[in-house]
Every structure is written in structure tokens, then in C-alpha cells.
Amino acid sequence: MKILAIETSCDDTGIAILEVSEKTEEFSVLSNIVSSQIEVHKKYGGVYPAMAKREHQRNLVPVLIRALKQAKLLNPKSEIRNPKQIPKSKIQKLNSILERESELAKKLVPFLQKHKKPKIDLIAVTNGPGLEPCLWVGVNFAKALSYFWNIPIVPTNHIESHILVNFLPTRPGLVGFPAVCLVVSGGHTQLILMEKIGNYKILGETRDDAAGECFDKCAKILGLGYPGGPIISQLATKFLGCPTPQKLPRPMINTKNYDFSFSGLKTAVLYANRKVENKTKRYKQEIASEIQQAIIDVLIKKTMKAAKDFKAKTIILGGGVTANKELRKQLTEKIEREIPNARYLIPNTQLSTDNALMVAVAGYFKAEQNKFMRWQDIEANANLRVE
């Protein structure tokens, strides 16, 4: 089975092609292309949905071409002078599907005119959660391809995809359940109990800012740039494991529930920064180290509590913030020390951030569960929940 996957939930345009052996359930990555919009949004210090939507419209067809070419599935039609034209009725239908994405339609129709249907068995697309204008671009693009190529389609949950990408190198039968999953990114911070693939319960989540959002906002307060997570992590390296004069709160770290709150940490950084007149490089390194450690302390404490309370056999991480080296290192050490019999799954750092390969993996399991949908019925849902 070959799966074409599409991801546009935020500011990364991703398309991947995954081949799955139905006998052995082994995954072969044929391509995984991501077009980042960081440079577009950097000067604004965050993602602007309308701008991100525009960039997705510009990027999807070029990214699709690159993904198909890398997978050796790009098949140009015979170079004759007058290739068979797409029937007018089909062009009208494509334009109708892409009514809200007119710029994308202008790129897609010529592509379909020039290329044969690739040998793809399934289309998977993120339909939520995320930024709604961005989600709709990917959803409508997937619907147009499903209609024109007559390929089955499954919608996937962005959060579930971050979890299931961990099964890319690991056969599902080797993973013990229940599993506790920490999904932590710019838009989400959730602890999820996973009884099996496709069966989830949210144990706790942020009540305000997500952890990645807190990184970004703290970096903005300190004048460090965007995205904040990698910048703060880099500055913090000089003081790893060392006490600093900067002391910040760890919101909700000792509560009995599994919820998070990072807005108070951001506010504490704002007030602390106002008191410092000479904001030297050393000061920024010190406070960056403390910001990073405060977030890590809370994430680890809550994750370990959930893992112990629910007797988790596996702990799974996912989301962009899990690319943070210190979070990975400290959580690994904590698990090995306190629950050494638990299995620990964390994706390759390149697969922690948004990408379409994780969508392809989730799409495969959706297909296994026969959760296909008619392309006409798929809609974007910015507030989609795992369940």
C-alpha cells in the first residue's frame, strides 16, 4: 500500500509518501517533504493564519511534485503536441472544490493536465486540530486529488499523528499498553492515555498557553526572535545543570491533576525582565536556562505522575517541543531511574515538528480500522479532539 499524506495544520506545508507492507506491517519512507514558513512569519513573532493559508496555496503543488519525484512516482504524460485535455466538467468540479483556494486551483489544474495518476492507494490528510484557514487548504487539496484520481481518502487527527509517528520504526505489536502520551507543541500541551491504537482519553492539558507558545512569548519578551524554543535552548546550553540567579515559578507542578498552565511563567518572565536594566548576554543565557528548566520540570513531573498512576507500560512523546534535547535527556534519565520497565518512545527530532510522514502513519491505521470517508464529507475542524 502506498499512502500520499498532506499536512497543513499550521505553518508547515508537508507532503509525504509512505509504502506499507501489508504482510509484515513494515514502513518504507519514499519521500517526506516539508516547506517551512518560518522566514515568512519571523518578522511578526508568530504565525498569521491568513498569511500561512496563502503560503500553503503557493507551496502545495511544488511540494507534491517534489514528493512524487523523490518517490519515483511522478509520471509526465507523453510529450505530444496536443495532450488530451481535462474535460470541462472536471475542471469545473475541481474549481468548485477549491473555491476558497483559487490560487491553488490555478496551479493544480495544469499539474493534473501534464501528469498521469500516480500509483497511490490512499490519501491521508490532517483535518484538525490546527489553524482553520490552514487546515481547509490541505483538506480541499486532498479532496480535489481524491476526486480527480479516484483514490480513497481518510482524515487524520494532528495530535494522534504526533503519537503514531513513533510506530514508524517500531512494530505496534511490540508496544505495551496502556501508554501515556505527552504531546507538546506550539499549540498543544496534552497528556493522553492510550489504551490501544485509536482509543484515547485526554488526562490533562494546558489551561492557557501551550509549552511551545510559552517559549515563543518568552523569547519575544527578551527580544530573542522567533521561533523561541530553539533560540532559548541554544542560549541555555551554557548553564545546563548549573544554578542561576534567575528564579521562575513552575505553575501547577504540584497539583493532583494532570493539567498544565504556562501563562503565569510567561508573566513572571515579563516582570523579571522589566527589573533588569543591563540586559547582558550572560543575563539572557541565565534566564533562558531557567525558562527552559521551568517548562521541563513541569512536563516531566506531570508525565511521570500519569505514567505511575495508570501503570503505563509505554511512555510516548510527540510534538515540536519534544525536539528539545534537554527534555529528551532528562525525561529519559527519570524513566530509567524510576520506572525502568516502561518502554520509552520518542520520534527522531526531524519528525517531532509538523510533517506529513506522521499523517501517513496515522492514515495507515485509519485505513486498517476501515475509517474511510467520502471526500465530499470531510471537513476541517480546528478544535478536533482525540478520542
Image: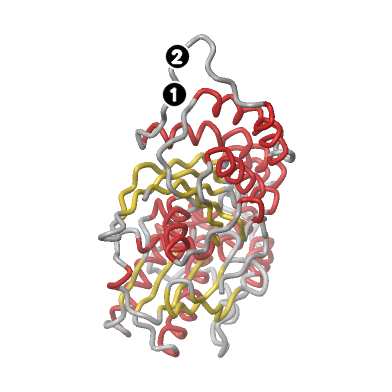
Residue 202: x percent and y percent? Answer: 56, 78
Quarter-wise, where is residue 157 in the image? bottom right
Q: Pick out the residue farthest to the top.
A: 81
Residue in the picture at 65% in, 40% down = 43
Q: Is residue 126 above or below residue 58?
A: below
Q: Is residue 229 above or below residue 45?
A: below
Image disc number at residue 79: 2
Amino acid at pointer 1: Pro
Residue in the picture at 69% in, 41% down = 97
Colouring of the image: secondary structure
Looking at the figure, which quarter contains the C terminus?
Answer: bottom right
Residue 293: x percent and y percent? Answer: 47, 69
Binning the other alpha carbons within 10 Å of mark 2 as few (below 14), some (14 to 19) or many (20 upward) gives few
Residue 166: x percent and y percent? Answer: 37, 63
Instruction: Give the Cα separation between the discs numbered 1 and 2.
Output: 8 Å
The one nearer the camera, 202 or 228, is 202
Q: Are marks 1 and 2 in contact (CB under 8 Å)?
A: yes
Residue 240: x percent and y percent? Answer: 39, 64
Helix or strand or loop: what does disc 1 sit on?
loop
Q: Is 211 left or right of 318, judged from the image as shown?
A: right
Image disc number at residue 76: 1
Quarter-wise, where is residue 180 in the image? bottom left
Residue in the picture at 45% in, 22% down = 77
The one nearer the camera, 248 or 321, is 321
Q: Is residue 185 above or below residue 1?
A: below
Helix or strand or loop: what does disc 2 sit on?
loop
